[in-house]
Amino acid sequence: MIDTPMKCKWFTLILLYLVLVLNASTNAYATTTHTKDIEIYKLYTHIKLLNHNEYLCLEQLWSRESNWNSRADNKLSTAYGIPQLLHLKTNDPYKQIDAGLKYIAYRYGTPCKALAYHLKRGYY
């Protein structure tokens, strides 16, 4: 019998593999972001977080910021991409997600704390 942490690791690895396989047949740099691409970005993010409640906060936050568009560009600042980070230079949505998660962890600790800050101030 496989213990629960091992099941979680295998489940995560299988989901990540599916994300990579599904994404291999799509163009991640398309001018418009398709629903299929957005769902893959969200699945990738959920796998990275491994906490459903924190994922729900992050999903709401980034839906407000960019609607999960990897090409979202803020005309009033240098904010760019899915997480709308300042001075973000990459068009790769997965690197954007990773950078956004690192920023949130460093600045707020959790996506739910970042969302709470955003709801009070209009930015995070």
Image (cartoon, grey):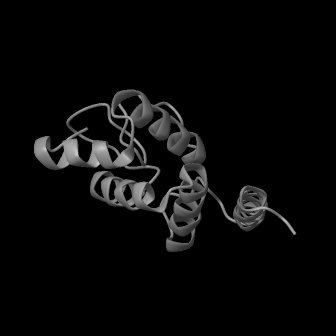
Q: Position of residue 48 (x, y in %)?
A: 59, 50
Residue shown at the point (29%, 43%) measured from the top left: 113
The residue sitting at 12% across, 41% down in the picture is 121
Q: Compared with residue 86, is residue 70 higher up or lower down, i.e. above or below?
A: below
Instruction: Identify which residue, 52 or 117, lies in the foreground.
Output: 52
> Relative to 103, does residue 121 appear above or below in the rendering?
below
10 relative to 77 in the view: left or right = right
Q: Residue at x 51, y 65 (%)?
A: 38
Please identify the quarter of the rendering in which residue 118 is found.
top left
How many numbered discs?
0
Quarter occupied by the N terminus: bottom right
The residue at the point 50 percent across, 56 percent down is: 51
Can you name the residue that lies furthest to the bottom here?
35
Whether 96 is drawn above or below 86: the answer is below
Give the camera-side residue of 28 and 8: 8
Quadrant location of the C terminus? Answer: top left
Give the x, y percent position of residue 99: 50, 35
**Depth check, front residue: 17 or 87:** 17
Q: 14 left or right of 41?
A: right
Q: Residue furthest left?
A: 120
The image shows residue 53 at horizontal and vertical percentages of: 41, 60
Q: Position of residue 83 (x, y in %)?
A: 40, 44
As drawn, 95 above or below 41: above
